[in-house]
Image (spheres, helix red, strand yellow):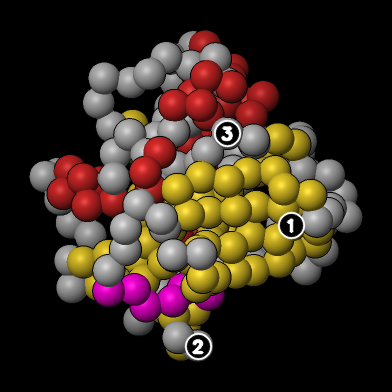
Amino acid sequence: MNQNLNTVLLDGQPIMPSKIICIGRNYVEHIEELGNEIPQEMVVFAKPNSAISSTLHARLGESLHYEGEICFMVIDGKLAAVAFGLDITKRALQSRLKSKGLPWERAKAFDGSALFSPFSPIEKWNESLSVELAINNQPRQAGHVGLMMYKPDDILRELGTFMTLNDGDIIMTGTPKGVGEIKHDDLFSGRILLNSEVIAAAQWIAGHK
C-alpha cells in the first residue's frame, strides 16, 4: 500500500480514501446564492486523495472560499461513518471555467481543497442529521438532510450506477447557503449533529498548520 496517500481518522484509526466524490448544487438556497440553475440531474465531481489536508489555507495563488458539508465514509457499500468537511474552492477560477463550459477540477480538486473532522461510525440517520459552521464563533452555515435535493441514500444509489466506491472513500453531500471567502487567522468551527447531539466536530485556524 502506498504510504504517501493522505489519511483521515475513523474511530482514531487512519484510513486512506482512494477518492472523494462530491455532490454539487444539492441545497436550493445555495444554488440561488451563487446564481446557478437548479440542475435536472445530480451534479457529481471528484477530488483525489491528494486534496486531503489538515491545513486550512487562506490563499493558494488566489482567494479561497469555504463550503461546509455533511460527509460520509463508505465501508462495505454502506454509508458507515460521518464527519464535518470543508470543500475549499477557488471561486473566481471556477466562475471562469464554468463560463467557458470547462471542467471544474482546477478550482475544486487542488491539493489542500478537502478538510475533514474525525469520522464517527453511524448506523442510522434521519432528516435531523445536520451541519453547522461558525467562523470566529459567529454562525455562518447550517443545513440538514431534510433540505437536500438528493438524500444520502439517493446519492449512494446513483453513484453505484456508474462508479465503484472502495472502502474508505468519502462522499461530500453538498453545502447549504452561507459560503464565503476565507480570511487569514479566521477560526473555523464545524460540527455534525444527529437529534441535536454533536457526533463529529473539528476546528481550524486559516493559514495555520
Q: Is residue 52 visible?
A: no
Question: Is tag 2's residue or tag 1's residue first in the polypeptide sequence?
Answer: 2
- Identify the amino acid type marked 3: Lys
Q: Secondary structure at mark 3?
A: loop
Q: Nearer the viewer, residue 46 or 120?
A: 120
Q: Which residue is mark 1?
A: 188
Which range is magenta?
118-123
Mark 2, other Cα within 10 Å: few <14 / some 14–19 / many ≥20 = few
Residue that mark 3 sits on: 177
Pointer 3 with pointer 1, Cβ within 8 A: no
User: Which tag, 2 or 3, sits closer to the chain's start?
Assistant: 2
SS at circle 1:
strand
User: Which quadrant of the structure image shows residue 151?
Assistant: top left
In what quadrant of the picture does the N terminus appear?
A: bottom left
Q: Which residue of the protein is positioned furthest toward the top in this rendering?
A: 99
Judge whether 46 appears above or below 63 on screen: below
* Residue 76 makes an appearance in the image: yes
Q: Residues within 10 Å of mark 3 (few under 14, many from 20)?
A: some
Q: Judge left or right: residue 199 versus residue 112.
A: left
Q: Which residue is mark 2?
A: 12
Q: Is residue 150 above or below residue 198?
A: above
Question: Which residue appears farthest toward the front when viewing the image?
Answer: 195
